[in-house]
Amino acid sequence: MIEVKNVTKKFGSTLSLDNASLTFEKNDYVALMGPNGAGKTTLIRLILGYYHPNSGEVLINGLSPIKDRLEVLEHISFVPQLPPPIKLSLEELISYVCASAKIEKKEIFHFAKEMELDLVPNLGKSFFKLSGGMKQKMLIAISLAKKSEIIIYDEPTANLDPKARDNFYRLLKENENGKISLFVSHRLDEIKDIVNRQIYMDLGKVVSDEKI
């Protein structure tokens, strides 16, 4: 369970989240929507423990993502909108995530294949130098291979072609049972078949929260 309790977050004089409260439970598949500056990314980064709230509290299965960050992150997979500037080769990256997140290597290869990313001829290449689409496919494969209780995707299809998008949504549908899934997206039409809840935010507030 994710509990966001009366959370306010400011950056200088800018109010990014304004006394926001939300609860996410198992089998919540959520479209998190709203204009730029609505507070969506701030909310995600508070859940991940990147930010400290000015007031209020965030709990993941009863634990603080700040005080208990390592334990909390064991249960979360996250794919950002912009891939991080990782300088490791794909082979090094796979070895690292398998060791640090207890992921089975064969699972990464399985989901990469499902995303039509051929890893074998690319293992020696730097992640940083891959195309945007290949980076995103790699991060998606890792996120699915981790089999986390909570998955968070921030505009995950921004760099994907239509076929890759179809593969991504098919894999999510096949692997969503019993999870919490949060999708920051501007395209409800794309994710309407895999979400059952729509939250709209604006100016740091939750404007609407509806089952769909």
Image (cartoon, helix red, strand yellow):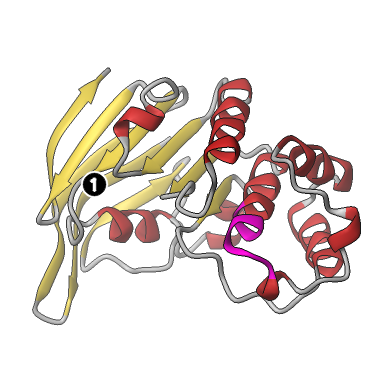
Residue picked out by circle 1: 5
The amino acid at mark 1 is Lys
Q: Nearer the viewer, residue 75 or 146?
A: 146
Is residue 134 covered in magenta?
yes
Quadrant housing the N terminus: top left
Q: Position of residue 81 (x, y in %)?
A: 45, 58
> Horizontal placement of 62 versus 6: left or right?
right
Look at the image and give the residue range highlighted in magenta: 130-136
Q: Quadrant of residue 134?
A: bottom right
Residue occupying image coordinates x 22% and y 57%: 39
Q: How many marks?
A: 1
Residue occupying image coordinates x 29% and y 46%: 4
Is residue 77 covered in magenta?
no
Quadrant housing the C terminus: top left
Residue occupying image coordinates x 25% and y 19%: 211
Q: Nearer the viewer, residue 42 or 212?
A: 212
Magenta residues, dominant SS class: helix
